[in-house]
Amino acid sequence: MRTQSPKAERPEHLHLQVDLGQRSYPIVIGSGALADPLLAEHCAGRRCVLVSDQNVAPLYARTLLDRLALVDDDLIALPAGEQHKHLGSFQAILTRMAERGLRRDGCVIALGGGVIGDLAGFAAACYMRGIDFVQCPTTLLAMVDSSVGGKTGLNLPSGKNLVGAFWQPQLVLADVAALSTLSAREYRAGLAEVIKYAAIADPDFFDWLQRNVDAINAHDADAIVHMVATSCRHKAAIVARDEREAGERALLNLGHTFGHALEAATDYTQLLHGEAVAIGMVQAAQLSALLGMADAADTQRLIDLLSAVGLPSVAPPLPLDRLRHHLALDKKAVAGGLKFILWRGIGKAEIVSGVDERALDAVLSGQ
Ligand code: NAD
Ligand code: GLY
C-alpha cells in the first residue's frame, strides 16, 4: 500500500492504493471524490449500471448518471436497509444488467452504504462469471471498511452474509461530502469501525481519536478525511497481506463475533451493526482482561472513547443461551470451536481459540 500525490490536473483528493498485483486499485478520498475523472475514464466506452438504494439515489444518483451519460434505466434503486440484502435484490440487479445489455466488459457502480456495496459487488462477481465494479461508498462505515477489500455477499433467512465471494473493485471513490446527509446515528455507527482499526493495530491513532473527539463529534471535514484515510490505509495493508482471510485479516473482526451474536439475538432491530461492534469490542476487551491477556485499564480507555463519541459499550439484557446459540453460528467457528479476536492492550489484537467457557459466560452475562 502506498500513498500517491494527487496529479496536478486532478482535484486535490487523496489517492491510496490497494496493492494486489494485477488486481491493485486506487481509493480516492476527499470532498467531491465522486467527480474524480478516474470514474469517467473507467466507464468510458462500456455499458454500466448504477446500483443504489431509495434513500441515496434521490440525493446522488442524478449527478453520476449525467456525468457518465447513463439513462434512467441504468439506475437500479433498491429498497434501503439490511433486510433487503437478500437474493431477491441480487436477482433484481442481475436481471437489469442483462436487460441493459451488459457484456463481459460491462461495469457495475455501487453507490450507497455497505448493503449496496455488498450486493452490487456480489452481482458483479457472478454476472458472466465476473465483471468490473466500482465502489462509491456513502456511509462512514462503507468508506472505512466495506468498500475496500473485496468481500461481497448477501444474507439468507438463516444467517447474515452466508452467501458471498471475494471480488475486488477496480476503483473506490470515498466522497466525504456525501456524509453531510447521513443520519447522526449512522455516522456514529461508522465510528465504531474506525475505532476498531486503532484498537487492533494503531495506539497512536487511538490517542489521536481521543484528542480529537470534539472535531469528530462536530463532523469536522479534516477529521473525517483523516479517519477515512487512516482506516483505509490499515485495511488496504491487511488485505494486501491476506486477501482471503487465511490469517491476519480476521483481526478486522475485533468485536464482530460478539457483535453479530448481539445483532442476531435482537433480531437485527435494536442495534446498528456499528453499535453492536462497539459493544462487542468492549466484550472482547473484557474477555482479554479476564483471561489475563490485557489490563482492565485498556478496557476502560476503550469504553471512555466509545462513550465520548456516543457509542454504547453495554449489551442489552439477553438470555445467555440465546447469545450462545448465535455465537455458535459465527462464520469463524471451526470444528475445534469458537475463535475470538482478543487483545493484549490497545493496538495489539490476536486470534485466540479454545477460550475458557466460564470466562466467556461471565462476559456474556455482564458479570
Ligand atoms: P446501509 O448500507 O444499510 O446504510 C445505512 C443507511 O444509511 C441506509 O438507510 C442508507 O439508505 C442510508 N444512507 C447511506 N448513505 C447515505 C447518505 N450519504 N445520506 C443519507 N442516507 C444514507 O448500512 P452500512 O452501515 O453502510 O453497511 C452495513 C452493511 O455493510 C452490512 O450489511 C454489513 O454486513 C456490511 N459490511 C460489509 C463489509 C465488507 O467488508 N464487505 C464490512 C462491514 C460491513
Ligand atoms: N470487514 C472485515 C473484512 O473486510 O475483512
Image (cartoon, grey):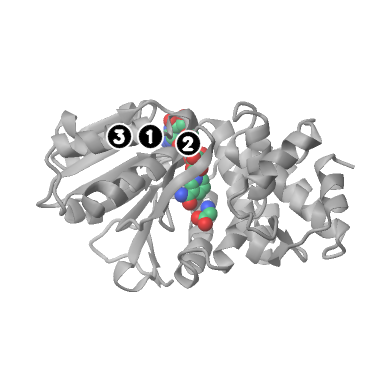
Viewer-closest of 43 and 188: 43
At label 3, the amino acid type is: Gln
> Circles 3 and 1: CB distance less than 8 Å?
yes
> Circles 1 and 2: CB distance less than 8 Å?
yes
Q: Residue 197, how many percent across, how many down? A: 60, 58
* Quadrant where the image shows the N terminus: bottom left
At label 1, the amino acid type is: Leu
- 319 lies left or right of 348: right
Q: Secondary structure at mark 2?
A: strand
Q: Residue 105, how many percent across, how many down? A: 15, 54
Disc 3/disc 1 C-alpha distance (Å): 6 Å
At label 2, the amino acid type is: Leu
Q: Secondary structure at mark 1?
A: helix
Residue receiving disc 1: 87
Q: Is mark 3 within 8 Å of ligand 1?
A: no
Residue located at (78% from left, 54% from top): 285
Q: Which mark is residue 156?
A: 2
Q: Is residue 191 visible?
A: yes
Q: Residue 266, how many percent across, how many down? A: 66, 29
* Quadrant where the image shows the C terminus: top right
Q: Which is nearer the N-term, disc 1 or disc 2?
A: 1
Residue receiving disc 3: 91
